[in-house]
Amino acid sequence: MKSINAIIGMACASAMLFACSGKQQENQEQKEELPLVSIEKVMEEDVPQIVSYTATVEPFKTNNISASSSNRIKSILVDVGSTVRAGQTLVILDAVNIDQQEIRIANMKREYDRAVELLNIGGGTQQQVDQLKTEYDAAVRALKNMKENTTLVSPVAGVVTVRNYDPGDMTGQLPILTIEQQQPVKVMINITEQDFAKVKKGMKVKVKLDVYGDEEFMGTVYLIHPTIDASTRTFTVEVTLPNSDNRIRTGMFARVEFNYGTQRHVVVPDRAVVKQSGSGNKYVYVYKDGKVSYNQVQIGQRLGTRYELLSGVDNNSDVVVTGQTRLADGVQVEIQQSQSAPRDTTATK
């Protein structure tokens, strides 16, 4: 009997040991099935608000030299590439129309004087005298305009960039010459509506030209257009660049950098940002109390290997940086390792 009881006791002990062992194995398997993730703590930082735009260099002013009416070109005194000063004579047109107008004015003057004499001796009427005087004055103004448009001068100092005619041609719809003022030059930039209050007239900006590599030129906000384009939600800003040495040429590709100061924003490692498939939305998994939440974020600047976040993650949060493939909102996870976020505040485009 004692032998039977001993056997039964050993069997019960074995069963209990097996049950405990099985439960431990089950718990271990459940634990191993939890997604393994790495997290990093993120903090707010003072982030320089630097925004870059691309633009094309344009002349500060462009003047098209044209005749007021169709006329034959007698001579053109400059060519493409010529540097001209303000007031310099550029084109001389045929003066035959002036000669004809002067003869016409002389005849009109005689008719007017004759009408005045008749009125003085009791012939003619005051109405006739007034009409002739009006016609005579109009002809004199037309002659003055002809003379001004027979010798065409440059209204600005600049460079001749276009020539559409040769001597002997009749002027048409195209301008005879185009003058571009290139001291200074300017770039025109379309800036997003949200930055309208940040841009001030006279503020300094950095400009790089692709042809000169990393060399920086200092520009100045010259004009802020007062309206916002409803279709693009942008407004236009004109930035001038000094160009006394003529190194900057119109048509060059420019990169313009605006510095809007600094703002405190949360900065996260770029590994923490997950792009949602099929959309442009971006998310970050935030770890808290053993689980992760799927937070949609608004990305700001890229700072080396990190991103500035404009919204979506609170200060002093723990974010997942590896192991996101098996995650979903509310999933319980196991922490693999934890480390501090690297300090890298180098702003990039």
Image (spheres, rainbow, N blue to C red):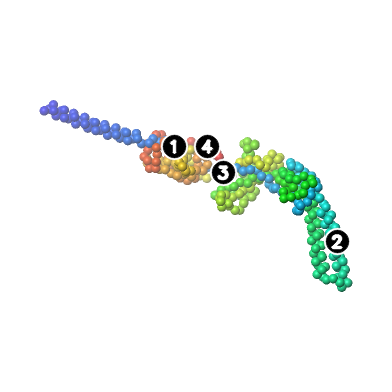
The label nearer to you, 4 versus 2, is 2
Q: Which one is earlier in the sequence, the residue at label 3 or at label 1?
A: 3
The answer to which image quadrant residue 294 occupies is top left
Check disc 1 and report its element: helix, strand or loop: strand
Q: Earlier in the sequence, mark 2 or mark 3?
A: 3
| Outermost residue, bottom side | 122
| Tag 3 residue | 51
Relative placement, left or right, of 85 versus 325 is: right
What residue is at 41 percent from the left and 36 percent from the top?
A: 323
Q: Horizontally, is 273 left or right of 12 in the view?
A: right
* Numbered mark located on residue 107 in the image: 2
Looking at the image, is mark 4 or mark 1 earlier in the sequence? 4
**Looking at the image, which residue is at 81% across and 57% down?**
143
Report how far apart the C-alphas of labels 2 and 3 lie in the structure.
Answer: 70 Å
Q: CA distance from mark 1 to mark 2?
A: 95 Å
Crowdedness near tag 1: few (<14), some (14–19) or many (≥20) residues, C-alpha within 10 Å = many
- On the image, the x and y values in percent for residue 83 come to 75, 43
For disc 1, the marked residue is 321
Q: Which image quarter: residue 215?
A: top right
Whether residue 39 appears in this view of the structure is: no
Q: Give the amino acid type for the residue marked by disc 2 in the picture.
A: Asn
Nearer the N terminus, badge 4 or badge 3? 3
Give the quarter of the figure containing the N terminus.
Answer: top left
- Front position among marks 2 and 3: 2
In the displayed structure, 76 sits above or below 17; it is: below
Q: Which residue is mark 4?
A: 304
**Element carrying mark 2:** helix
